[in-house]
Amino acid sequence: MSISEYIAILRREIEKLDTFGFAESIDFRDELRAGKQAIINVNVSLVDGSSLVIKEYVDAKYGIEILSYAYHFQDQNNILIFRYDNASHKPMLGFEQHKHIGQKDIIEAPPPNIIELLEEVISYL
């Protein structure tokens, strides 16, 4: 799969939020980089006032590899509901891929694919 195909799939799945009446607005930005890389930033405002922010740094040199990611979902009061990411923490967590649940809990968790992520967000609406 090319980087362009990956971005098109991601965009199509996210736009389903609007098609099915869950999104107030969607701001989808992608920046293609040399070496078959891309930075993807998506901001979705949802009908209940909550928001979803998706950030990915993708390398497609040898297939799609998401080098860094953050999938941040917060309520209308800007309070974190959940966030998946692979950012380093201090002190170290003992695992790279993780999920923040609310303000305090962090558990080991692989990143969801886009369909799983959107289904989890919709379950809160």
Image (tube, rainbow, N blue to C red):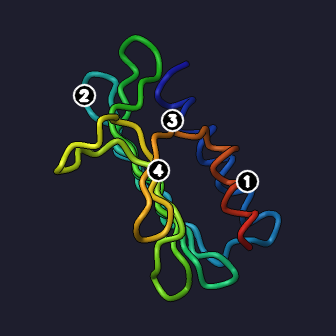
Question: Is residue 110 shown left or right of residue 90?
Answer: right
- Mark toward the viewer: 3 or 1: 3
The residue under the point 71% across, 69% down is: 124
Looking at the rendered image, the disc whose residue lies closer to the viewer, 2 or 3, is 3
Q: Which residue is mark 2?
A: 34
Q: In the image, what residue occupies the spot 46% across and 57% down?
A: 83
> Are circles 4 and 1 on residues that touch, CB within 8 Å?
no
Specify the farthest residue to the bottom: 77
Q: Mark 2: which amino acid? A: Ala
The type of residue carrying mark 1 is Glu
Left or right of residue 95: residue 121? right
Determine which residue is flagged by label 1.
119
At which x and y percent is residue 81?
54, 69
Q: Is residue 40 above or below residue 62?
A: below
Q: Earlier in the sequence, mark 4 or mark 1?
A: 4
Label 1, label 2: how far apart the Cα atoms are: 33 Å
Is there CB contact under 8 Å for labels 3 and 4? no
Q: Which mark is residue 110?
A: 3
Q: Within 10 angstroms of label 4, few (less than 14), some, or many (20 or more) residues?
A: many
Q: From the image, which quarter does the N terminus lie in?
A: top right
Q: Write the residue at 40% across / 37% down.
A: 97
| Residue 32 placement: quadrant | top left
Kind of residue at disc 3: Pro
